[in-house]
Image (spheres, rainbow, N blue to C red):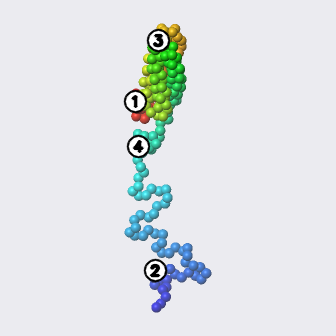
Amino acid sequence: MSSPTSGSDPNFPPPAPEGQSNWGTPQQGYGQPQQGYGQPEQGYGQPQQGYSPAPSYGNAPAGYGAPAAQRPGMVTAAAIIGIVWGALGALFSLIVMLAAFGLGAPVVGLVLLLSLAFSIALLVGGIFVLQGKEPKILLYACYAAIVIGVIELIVSIAMTGGNAFSGVLGFVIPGVIIALLFQAQSRQYFAARGMKY
């Protein structure tokens, strides 16, 4: 049996010179793609063959690949005015309604009860708008608040000679909210979220 030499077996490496080893020297066949194993390996960060990134949908809901539209300042202002005016209106209506029923003025008490309900609707509608929900509750509450404000003004002046200033504010503030929500930027913001009013 003879020892293999460098010429007898092409896959057998020649012996290393004395003091050196074969470690670290590339041997024939290493580092080349082998037949029958497909494509060579690809580095990190490169897409693999046949891989395509997930499609992006332009009208996907916020948080699912589409950037959320930033809320315009007019919408924020309308919501905050609705919240503040609704909270103040609810508190004022509750106090005056209880006083009216206590003093034997049931007509004024009933009007103020309606005012209390619509003030709470203003408050809830403003919170919904801040949360990015439809502004319909806020708008309907504003329409109703204008009607109630006019009725309160008439009843207050007719029965008690009351303060016209509070009645005027009762339909001016909701009118401002409606005007803010019907600005072009506000309508575009809600239309981008699939809401029309």
User: Which of the 4 quarters of the picture holds residue 39?
Assistant: bottom left
The residue lying furthest to the bottom in this view is: 1
Cα gap from disc 2 to disc 3, whole angstroms: 111 Å
Residue behind mark 1: 196
What is the number of the mark on residue 10?
2
Q: Are marks 4 and 1 in contact (CB under 8 Å)?
A: no
Q: Earlier in the sequence, mark 4 or mark 3?
A: 4
Disc 4 element = loop
Residue 80 position (above or below residue 162):
below
Residue 35 location (% of width, % of height) = 40, 70
Of 5 and 70, nearer the camera is: 70
Residue 164 location (% of width, % of height) = 52, 12
Residue behind mark 3: 155
Q: Earlier in the sequence, mark 1 or mark 2?
A: 2
Residue behind mark 4: 57
Foreground disc of the pair 2, 4:
4
User: Which of the 4 quarters of the picture holds residue 41?
Assistant: bottom left
Mark 3 surroundings within 10 Å by alpha-carbon count, few (fewer than 14), some (14 through 19), many (20 or more): some
Mark 4 surroundings within 10 Å by alpha-carbon count, few (fewer than 14), some (14 through 19), many (20 or more): few
Mark 2 surroundings within 10 Å by alpha-carbon count, few (fewer than 14), some (14 through 19), many (20 or more): few
